[in-house]
């Protein structure tokens, strides 16, 4: 891991709303996986982008291909998902929305359905272990896989939403933003929304997606991933900003991911400031904590140090994020109470 994170940010209760399962695999879990599959000859620098390194977007997406080779059975998924949940809990995350793309692996017999079933099993095993974290699942649609797979994935998400008593809460649209057009997937996304799934869509992660973002915002989604190039100052459009603000759609912001993937030139140039200054809902997230060698506590600390925000400001960001979750009203209320209970000891033991 890179330099130390203050105890304050580690202990501060947090919600994580943008975490891709296979991007969140830690070094220690990768070691367990490479020991299971030594013949693949995979080294750590092929699965993570650590201190000071930056890669092109394309190189970053290659990393996921390597991780997918390591994680290709139900047994792997179960271990990875349980490890990832435990590690978020260790970092003070009290509510986690994990997302992942159901993957079919012909060689091992894993199907998209058994994939989702296994993630659900991992969540319920962590619940039985009494971990201090509530976990919900968003099923991811990979934009590279086209309309047919998207429709199939929506059906799967709907089935599991109904059969898991609400553990599956929504649908994510992700994948390499330079491939495919989100507009082609609109009917699938609309179908998901109509059946009660919440939508979190990666949007304007790279420049020149104005047309696509206009279409996606018409649905409208319940949350936006990144939204790096929405505003006119960076080549987006005022009409996009207007739609986002009118519908009050929270943005999931992942600083380290954007800087290491080079869609944002530096931390201080991150679009966090644009939306924060507007008073628009934003939530700090990790995206891929394993691949980008970060943690949610580190991301909070980074935002505070980059933009000169106080511990009170950061607390307030973390507290407000509860309202942007896809949790039920009663769980949101429970989380609010929890935050208020934890607050005095946090500000007492860890002075400013
Ligand atoms: C390259 C880069 C800067 C990544 C960060 N931005 C991202 N943008 C779009 N999709 C993503 C990103 N990070 C992870 N994903 C999606 O999450 C997958 C990995 O997690 P999973 O297999 O769905 O469990 C990737 O294959 C990709 O489809
Ligand atoms: Zn993402």
Image (cartoon, rainbow, N blue to C red):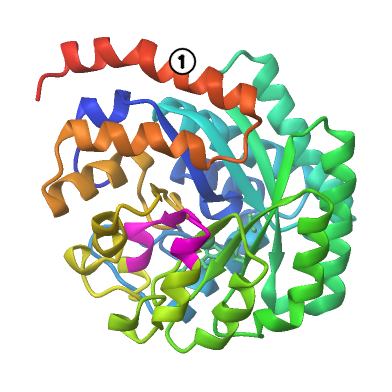
Classify the position of the C terminus by image quarter.
top left
Question: Quick check: can you spot residue 132?
Answer: no
Residues drawn in magenta: 244-258
Q: Percent position (x, y) of residue 42?
A: 53, 61
Nearer to the camera, 242 or 213: 242
At a point 60% along the width and 44% down the height, the residue shown is 98
Vertical side of 288 occupied by 181: above or below: below
- Which quadrant would the N terminus be assigned to in this image? top left
Name which residue lies at 22% across and 42% down.
301
> Is the residue 254 above or below the residue 119 in the image?
below
Q: Which residue is mark 1?
A: 337
Q: Residue at x 63, y 28 (%)?
A: 329
**How far across and down, in percent of the image, does residue 67 sit?**
59, 59
In the image, taking residue 264 as reference, residue 35 lies left or right, namely: right
From where the camera sits, is residue 60 visible? yes
Q: Quadrant of residue 273?
A: bottom left
């Amino acid at each position: 891991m890179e330099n130390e994170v203050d105890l304050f940010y580690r202990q501060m209760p947090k919600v994580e709303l943008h975490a891709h399962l296979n991007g969140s695999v830690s070094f220690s879990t990768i070691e367990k996986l490479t020991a299971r599959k030594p013949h693949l000859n995979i080294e750590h620098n092929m699965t993570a982008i650590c201190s000071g390194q930056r890669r092109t977007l394309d190189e970053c997406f290659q990393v996921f291909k390597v991780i997918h080779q390591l994680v290709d059975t139900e047994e792997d998924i179960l271990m990875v998902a349980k490890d990832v949940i435990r590690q978020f809990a260790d970092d003070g995350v009290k509510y986690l929305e994990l997302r992942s793309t159901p993957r079919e692996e012909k060689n091992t017999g894993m199907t998209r359905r058994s994939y989702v079933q296994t993630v659900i099993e991992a969540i319920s095993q962590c619940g039985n272990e009494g971990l201090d974290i509530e976990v919900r699942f968003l099923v991811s649609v990979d934009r590279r896989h086209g309309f047919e797979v998207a429709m199939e994935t929506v059906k799967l998400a709907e089935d599991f939403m109904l059969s898991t008593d609400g553990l599956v809460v929504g649908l994510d649209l992700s994948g390499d933003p330079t491939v495919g057009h989100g507009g082609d997937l609109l009917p699938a996304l609309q179908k998901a929304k109509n059946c009660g799934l919440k939508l979190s869509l990666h949007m304007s992660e790279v420049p020149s997606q104005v047309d696509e973002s206009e279409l996606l915002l018409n649905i409208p989604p319940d949350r936006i991933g990144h939204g790096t190039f929405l505003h006119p100052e960076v080549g987006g459009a005022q009409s996009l900003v207007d739609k986002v603000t009118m519908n009050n759609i929270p943005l999931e912001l992942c600083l380290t991911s954007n800087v290491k993937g080079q869609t944002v030139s530096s931390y201080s140039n991150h679009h966090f400031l644009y939306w924060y200054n507007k008073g628009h809902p934003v939530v700090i997230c990790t995206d891929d904590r394993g691949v980008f060698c970060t943690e949610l506590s580190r991301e909070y600390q980074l935002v505070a140090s980059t933009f000169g925000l106080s511990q009170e400001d950061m607390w307030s960001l973390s507290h407000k994020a509860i309202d942007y979750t896809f949790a039920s009203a009663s769980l949101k209320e429970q989380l609010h109470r929890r935050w208020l209970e934890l607050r005095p000891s946090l500000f007492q033991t860890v002075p400013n």
